[in-house]
Amino acid sequence: MGGRTDPGTPAGTPLDWRRAACAPAAQFARNGADVVVQYRYAGEVHELRLPNVIWSGLVQEARVDTFATLTAEWTQGAVAGGLVRHVDGHVDLRYGYLGLREIRLPATIWDQILAAIRSRAVDGLDR
């Protein structure tokens, strides 16, 4: 299950990256209609782009602890109508109305993303 990892932000498009002390492997930015999460895992840099509606849903769900007890079963209704689960050290995120997207993130990166949201270090990216 491949995540939506893009080759990167086009050169000449400087992003206003935000970092959070609680998420040392990740940085966050807004790029048009997407929120970009760039993270380092196992020595490689990955870039994840989430549409604003998905990011906004993720922020809302993270703040009410929807993801506090993820298991291998899909959690329904999370992330703007999507599904989330925790399996074998990874978190799978599935969303999309017209085109289904599936993202697999290392659980440690997922935890850092949630920590950055809860700490409010990335507030305002969904605007």
Image (cartoon, helix red, strand yellow):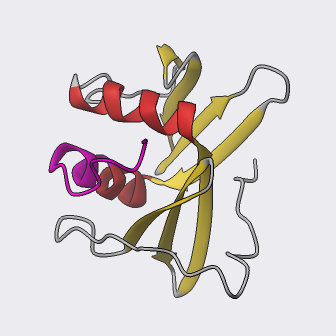
Q: Is residue 74 above or below residue 53?
A: above
Q: Position of residue 100 (x, y in %)?
A: 80, 30
Q: Is residue 74 above or below residue 107?
A: above
Q: Which residues are magenta?
A: 114-127
Q: Give the residue drawn at x 31%, y 58%.
A: 112
Please state if 50 lies on the left or on the right of 2 as rendered.
left
In the rendered image, the quadrant that contains the C terminus is top left
Q: Give the residue drawn at x 21%, y 57%.
A: 121
Q: Quadrant of residue 12?
A: bottom right
Of helix, strand and loop, which mostly describes the magenta segment?
Answer: loop
Q: Is residue 30 above or below residue 90?
A: below
Q: Is residue 1 above or below residue 67?
A: below
Q: Position of residue 117 (x, y in %)?
A: 27, 47
Is 32 inside the magenta-drawn segment? no
Q: Give the residue drawn at x 50%, y 30%.
A: 85
Q: Position of residue 47 (x, y in %)?
A: 61, 68
Is 124 or 64 nearer to us in this picture? 124
